[in-house]
Image (cartoon, helix red, strand yellow):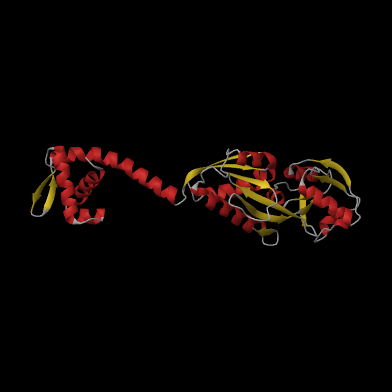
């Protein structure tokens, strides 16, 4: 028995005419007749009685039909799964991300992506940007999101977006009345910052030095979300990335544009030798579009 013969048998059982069965299978009537005849020869019993151009199933055919339905239902599931994979509705993605993204923005972007892909599965782990790069190079994830400047896109790495950093202020702070905060406004302020190993911290230090501004640095942490929490607790003011500002759920922090702008790049990396999941391209594009939509054109610069 061949699969196509069983499909022809099911079609004739459903429609009881070769004409309608052929239309269902998108084949000619002689082809359908031949498939049924070949199946009957293989089974060594008759499946249909032919009366005035119609086919009436035999008792044996009805008994066989139940098994064929169960078997072809499994084949149909496989076909649907293949369609979903081809149309990027099904699959698994292993994502590695730096804390500023994994603790804030990416969960929202992933949840939005999965709304329209009920059969897809995403697994996300959080590591430092350096560790994420190691995971990508070691083929231990499908995609990595890191804080990294990439000026020229390659086959396995590109800028996702660049975002303007913003000033985080405790609610009620004197600078909350300003529309835009600049370096001179921060003079003498207690300050919460990233460690010097973070590129954005180096950019900020250079900008403050260029303006002759000194701040009272009392607290450092590598996690942007934690910086927001310190600001809310009254530990000082800060300049942080727009992703963390957008996703921070505390009510005691006010975020203001910071000028001159300091940009932080977010890059997306993929393993050079690992097979690329069909979902990946649509996922990365969704994350980029989601960022543009949620953070706004004035904050996010497209890749």
**Apparent side of residue 71 relative to residue 56 in the rendered image (left or right):** right
- In which quadrant is the C terminus drawn? bottom right
**Apparent side of residue 265 relative to residue 155 in the rendered image (left or right):** right
- In which quadrant is the N terminus drawn? top left
Rendered view: 185 above or below 73: below
Q: Residue furthest left?
A: 52
Q: Position of residue 86 (x, y in %)?
A: 43, 50
Exactly how many numbered labels are in the figure? 0
Q: Report whether residue 221 is seen.
A: yes
Residue 78, located in which quarter of the rendered image?
Answer: top left
Which residue: 14% across, 42% down? 40
Residue toward you, 240 or 168 = 240
**Apparent side of residue 172 relative to residue 59 in the rendered image (left or right):** right
Residue toward you, 237 or 206 = 206
Q: Position of residue 55 (x, y in %)?
A: 13, 50
**Apparent side of residue 121 relative to residue 255 in the rendered image (left or right):** left
Which residue: 12% across, 42% down? 58
Q: Position of residue 75 (x, y in %)?
A: 32, 42
Residue toward you, 259 or 28 = 28
Q: Report whether residue 128 is seen.
A: no
Q: Position of residue 215 (x, y in %)?
A: 89, 49
């Amino acid at each position: 028995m061949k699969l196509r013969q069983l499909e022809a048998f099911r079609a004739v059982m459903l429609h009881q005419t070769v004409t309608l069965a052929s239309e269902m299978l998108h084949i000619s009537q002689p082809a359908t007749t031949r498939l049924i005849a070949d199946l009957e020869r293989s089974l060594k019993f008759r499946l249909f009685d032919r009366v005035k151009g119609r086919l009436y199933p035999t008792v044996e055919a009805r008994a066989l039909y139940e098994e064929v339905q169960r078997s072809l239902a499994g084949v149909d599931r496989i076909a649907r799964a293949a369609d979903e994979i081809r149309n990027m509705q099904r699959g698994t993605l292993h994502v590695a991300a730096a804390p500023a993204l994994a603790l804030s923005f990416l969960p929202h972007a992933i949840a939005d992506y999965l709304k329209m892909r009920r059969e897809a599965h995403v697994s996300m782990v959080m590591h430092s940007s350096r560790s994420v790069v190691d995971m990508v190079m070691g083929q231990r994830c499908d995609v990595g999101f890191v804080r990294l400047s990439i000026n020229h896109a390659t086959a396995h790495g590109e800028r996702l977006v660049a975002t303007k950093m913003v000033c985080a202020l405790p609610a009620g702070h004197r600078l909350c009345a300003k529309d835009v905060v600049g370096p001179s406004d921060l003079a003498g302020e207690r300050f919460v910052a990233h460690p010097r190993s973070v590129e954005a911290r180096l950019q900020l230090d250079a900008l403050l030095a260029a303006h002759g501004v000194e701040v009272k640095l009392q607290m450092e942490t590598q996690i942007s979300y934690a910086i927001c929490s310190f600001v809310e607790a009254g530990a000082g003011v800060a300049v942080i990335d727009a992703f963390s500002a957008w996703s921070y759920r505390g009510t005691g922090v006010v975020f203001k544009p910071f000028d001159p702008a300091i940009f932080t790049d977010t890059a997306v990396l993929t393993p050079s030798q690992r097979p690329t999941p069909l979902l990946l391209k649509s996922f990365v594009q969704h994350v980029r579009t989601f960022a543009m939509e949620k953070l706004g054109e004035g904050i996010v610069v497209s890749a």
